[in-house]
Image (cartoon, rainbow, N blue to C red):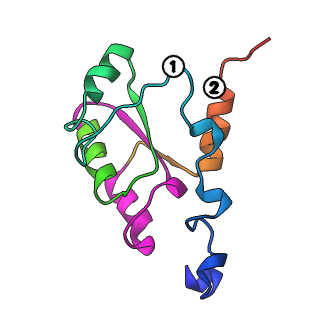
Amino acid sequence: MREDYGDDPSKWPGRPGAPEAWPASTLTDHPGDRILLMTGDDAFTSSNLRFVLRNLEIRNLILIGGPVETMLARTTHTAKQRDFRTLFALDAVSATRESERLGYVADLAPDYAVQTSELLRLMESAAPQTA
C-alpha cells in the first residue's frame, strides 16, 4: 500500500471513513431482505443460514464486509462443503494485514472473485426491469 499511495494513510483507498469504504446503497438492506444474527465466525454453524437458504432455494453466495482470514474463511469452507457457489468482492473484504488480503482470498478459491464495481454492474444487469 505504501509503495503505491505513500506514507499518509488518509490518502489510501478503502481506508475507514473514505467514501468508497462505505457499502453502496444497493448493498444495504431492502424490504424483503432477511437479516440473520450470527453467534460465531461461521455463518452456517452459528445461525440458521442453511435452513433459510434451502427454503429460498438459494445456491449462490456473495461474501463481503468481513475478515477474510476468520469469519469469511470459515463460512466459505462450510459453503463449499454444502455445495454453495461463492463470489468474493475483492475490495469489500478485510484482513488483519492488508498485504495478505488477496492471498487469503486466493487460498479460499471462491468460484468467482470480482471488484465491487463489477459486482454492482452484475447486480444492476440482473435486477428486474420496471416499466
Q: What residue is pinned by disc 1? A: 32
Magenta residue check for 51: no
Residue drawn where x is 75% and y is 14% of the image: 130
Residue drawn where x is 58% and y is 52% of the image: 115
Give SS at disc 2.
Answer: helix
92 left or right, relative to 130: left
Magenta segment boundaries in residue numbering: 81-109
Question: Which quadrant, please, contains the C terminus?
Answer: top right
Q: What residue is pinned by disc 2? A: 126
Callout 2: 10 Å neighbours few (<14), some, many (20+)? few
Q: Quadrant of residue 97?
A: bottom left
Give SS at disc 1.
Answer: loop
Amino acid type, mark 2: Ala
Q: Quadrant of residue 8?
A: bottom right
Q: Is residue 121 above or below residue 59?
A: below
**Residue 50 spot, x, y in % from top left:** 27, 26
